[in-house]
Image (cartoon, rainbow, N blue to C red):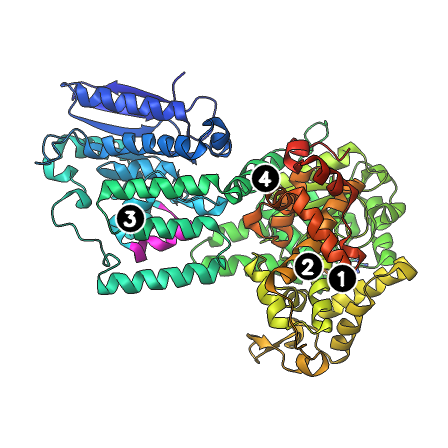
Amino acid sequence: MADFTAKTDADGITTITWDVPGKSMNVLSLEGLAELGAAIDAALKDEAVKGVVITSGKDTFAGGMDLNLIAKMKDMVGDDPARGLFEGVMRMHGVLRKIERAGMDPKTLKGGKPIAAALPGTALGIGLELPLACHRIFAADNPSAKIGLPEIMVGIFPGGGGTTRLVRKLGAMAAAPFLLEGKLSDPKKAKSAGLIDEVVADPLAAARAWVLAAKDADLVKPWDAKGYKMPGGAPYHPAGFLTFVGASAMVHGKTMGVYPAAKALLSAVYEGALVPFDTALKIEARWFTNILLNPSSTAMIRSLFINKEALEKGANRPEAPDQRVKKLGILGAGMMGAGIALVSAQAGIEVVLIDAKQEAADRGRAYTATHFDKAIKRGKASEAKKAEVLARITATTDYAALSGVDMIIEAVFEDPKVKAEVTKAAEAAAGKDVIFATNTSTLPITELARASQNAEQFIGVHFFSPVEKMALVEIIRGKATGDRAVAKALDYVRQIRKTPIVVHDARFFYANRSIIPYINEGIRMLAEGVAPTLVENAAKLVGMPLGPLQLVDETSIDLGVKIAKATKAAMGDDYPDDAVDEVLFWMADQGRLGRKSNAGFYAYDDAGKRLGLWEGLAERYPVADAQPDLTEVQHRLLFVQVLEAVRAFEDGVLTDIREGDVGAILGWGFAPWSGGPFSWLDIIGAARAAAICDELTAAHGPRFACPDLLRRMAGQGARFYDLYGDGAAAA
Ligand code: NAD
């Protein structure tokens, strides 16, 4: 069956319908592109055809290029991948440009056939680039439809002419949020921004009517007409000059230069603006090829699209009947419990929210009300929706209300005694089939399971804060946790539309195990006399969203102290972080607990605005005369994290590197451009990684010792994704 089918009616209008068999949303494949090209050729050649409408057989128009295909493309094009990719991209431009020119005489610009796009709903990526090549775009008045070019989010940029066309249509400044930030709009906003032309009740009918009435002049794009000037000015125009200087500074400020796609996009826009349209398309194609060949785009597509989706769809779900949650009990209505109640009720799940005092339970429920009030103010929710979601949350102190819940999530204080008490009480009220999940961030699941009537039904479901914003949920199998509990946790995470990883029980599980050493390394450097500005900026310049000192300010220094004390108690003489504790404990003694006390490694003003690094730091930890170079600081900050990830994989805590990479980016923001710790090691190569480990170990100690697995891989010239990319566990 074909992706595109064409039908010509009695009025001479050919309707080309895009409807990829077996997919809920259209995506463009190479075969699809060839079919579209052939359908356009046929319509242009057929004298009986007056014009064309391109639409979709689904309730959306299209989701974009098939990213699975993009990920594989550079391996499919033979010995000269740059040439093969460039030629492939140019073929796509060929089809779209044919639509745009529509058979008109290139000199007189007359004699073309009108081609309109009719979008029933969402149109993303190539799903908008194709309409942008048409002569007029009609979209259904469907407020839930999303229109835009989100390519930048997975490390590429609009390379199907979207970059060149949008800049020429709107000007560089107005196009910037759509191209550089992947901003999506509903149809009405897309129309007022100039992305599309019309929002109507019936786009197909409106497109047909337009095609029947269209004149030669209606088909000529501004950039194909004589005397075209780019809105806002081309680079050598005084206003255009300022735009481009500003855009360049903004992109570098936001991306720190680590996202190659943003830079390449800007180059394509700048260089393309200096030349005629068809040359600009070629320039866009060259930069797009450059990005497809950059290992960052491959890694980002793999982690942020392909593997993220595979995990969400249950790549690691054990066989078990449908375990979707109908009624959920939540113990503890504090920061985490309140957030979990919100996302669960939003997903249509009945929630019983329990706290020790009624006021605390009510406060937890009120969090949902406040969340909706803010959304209503921004026009993103309605009073009716708020009432509907709130009606699903019962706030109480009465454990009897847990009768009939099929899952419980415990989020009370991080104290094993309190947790044991509530576990017993809740299980007694809920009945014997209930799956009991704890949201602990530090306590071993296997220990906590002792309070349970059935350790097989006891599991860790670790959320990140703030719950409604953070996409990752870390599911932890205790020693005795059974498959049904894992399936239940995965089905629940799917219901609330988050991304799960499943790990085994070990100190700090996976995410915290890897991020705590990052914070500690930053603090350690400060104590050694490394300039804190160097530490913070080195982290950001390698793509970490927050420097380690800012991160500990955000999560709070007293939490750091608590974790350090507990870790030391557990590890005894092996404890490696006394140098870190000296700094942390001193900060806590000064009452500098981080953002929450308006004082931490950073200074804050009374309104809580972060000012700069606290000057008092330099008195206690003077900056040494000799400073390490930037790369060494970056290696220390990245290697402490990735080595922990490799050890977790070696230990079997992590059983799937895909989870290791996706979890690192979504859980703690590990340099997304790299695709995650394992992808990054593949990019630099195991041999180089092992050599850096050896240098760091010699200079800074055994925490940088090269794990055996990595050493072996260095010897074999092996890559993680070649050995374990299909989800295989470490041998
Ligand atoms: P919190 O102090 O904000 O909330 C805990 C709530 O539990 C309070 O409302 C308290 O009244 C209630 N509570 C205490 N004892 C109770 C009892 N016996 N019966 C019923 N309710 C009781 O804490 P939080 O930040 O929401 O953390 C809760 C859990 O989640 C902890 O285990 C923590 O380690 C874990 N966690 C926290 C974060 C985070 O960033 N804060 C992240 C992941 C996991």
Residue 645 in the image, given as x and y percentages of width and height:
72, 47
According to the picture, the residue beneath numbered tag 1 turns out to be: 700
According to the picture, the residue beneath numbered tag 4 turns out to be: 308
Q: Does the magenta-highlighted stretch encompass residue 615?
A: no
Mark found first going from the N terminus, 2 or 4: 4
The kind of residue on which mark 4 rests is Lys
Q: Residues within 10 Å of mark 1 (few under 14, many from 20)?
A: few
The kind of residue on which mark 2 rests is Arg
Q: Is residue 678 left or right of residue 217?
A: right
Q: Is residue 421 something that shows in the picture? A: yes
Q: Which residues are magenta?
A: 172-186
Checking the image for residue 239, the label placed there is none
Real-space CA distance between mark 2 and mark 4, rounded to the nearest whole angstrom: 28 Å
Real-space CA distance between mark 3 and mark 4, rounded to the nearest whole angstrom: 34 Å
Residue 263 in the image, given as x and y percentages of width and height:
42, 52
According to the picture, the residue beneath numbered tag 3 turns out to be: 272
Rendered residue at 86%/61% (across/down):
575
The kind of residue on which mark 1 rests is His
Q: Is residue 191 left or right of residue 441?
A: left
Mark found first going from the N terminus, 3 or 2: 3
- CB atoms at circles 3 and 4 under 8 Å apart? no
Q: Is mark 1 within 8 Å of ligand 1?
A: no
- Nearest to viewer (mark 4 / mark 1): 1
Q: Residues within 10 Å of mark 2 (few under 14, many from 20)?
A: many
Mark found first going from the N terminus, 1 or 3: 3
Rendered residue at 72%/28% (across/down):
320
The kind of residue on which mark 3 rests is Gly
- CB atoms at circles 4 and 1 under 8 Å apart? no
According to the picture, the residue beneath numbered tag 2 turns out to be: 636
Q: Secondary structure at mark 1?
A: helix
- Nearest to viewer (mark 1 / mark 3): 1
Mark found first going from the N terminus, 4 or 1: 4
